[in-house]
Amino acid sequence: MTQSTTRLLTGADWSQAVLLYNELTVGPPADDPAAFDVVLAHSGTQVLGAFVGDDLAAMVTLHLLPNVLWQGRPYGLIENVVTRQRYQRQGFGRRVMQAAIEAACAKNAYKLMLMTGRARGATGFYEALGFSGKDKFAMVLRQE
């Protein structure tokens, strides 16, 4: 695997993050740096990125939310996992996912959840990281 660093993203990373968001999405394109700033400023949310030099190779969003049933301990929700096409299959997605898992553990999260599109073929990637589809069934209600 190519040498890289992993860190929290900031608003200054928008120009590179937007490229990854738009490689990921099948919905409306990301085009508003203010929306990125809203996510970054949200309490309990982190966007982590793996860099090759100054080039953003992969990123993930981690939301930590408290749960009354677990004495206020948080659970984590993973969203927007994406690796830039030219860096795929080089370990950068795994690197940002491991950083998100470690960040959730550091906050004493009792579980991490994510959803992945059926057509994306990424279930094996997540299973190799320890995720399982056996305990939960995901459902989505979209409001466009």
Image: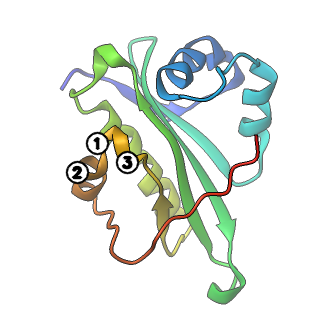
Instruction: Inspect the image, locate mark 3, and give the three-letter code of the amino acid beneath it.
Output: Arg
Q: How is the image coloured?
A: rainbow
Label 2 residue SS: helix
Label 2, residues with CA under 10 Å away: few <14, some 14-19, many ≥20:
few
Question: Where 12 falls versus 45 (above or below)?
Answer: above
The answer to whether residue 17 is left or right of residue 5 is right
If the image is split into quadrants, where does the N terminus sit?
Answer: top left
Q: Give the x, y percent position of residue 109.
A: 54, 70
Q: Which mark is residue 118?
A: 3
Residue depicted at x 22% and y 55%: 128
Residue depicted at x 66% and y 88%: 69
Badge 2 or badge 3: first in the primary sequence? 3
**What residue is shown with label 2?**
124
Question: Where 52 falls versus 25 (above or below)?
Answer: above
- Tell me the CA gap for discs 1 and 2: 7 Å
**What residue is shown with label 1?**
121
Q: Give the x, y percent position of residue 5.
A: 39, 27
* Residue contact at pointers 1 and 2, CB within 8 angstroms: yes
Label 3 residue SS: helix
Instruction: Inspect the image, locate mark 2, and give the three-letter code of the amino acid beneath it.
Output: Gly
- Tell me the CA gap for discs 3 and 1: 7 Å
Question: Where 14 falls versus 136 (above or below)?
Answer: above
Q: Which mark is residue 75?
A: none
**Who is closer to the viewer here, 127 or 53?**
127
Q: What is the number of callouts on the image?
A: 3
**Who is closer to the viewer here, 136 or 111?**
136
Instruction: Inspect the image, locate mark 1, and give the three-letter code of the amino acid beneath it.
Output: Gly
**Who is closer to the viewer here, 71 or 130?**
130
Q: Give the x, y percent position of residue 81.
A: 46, 39
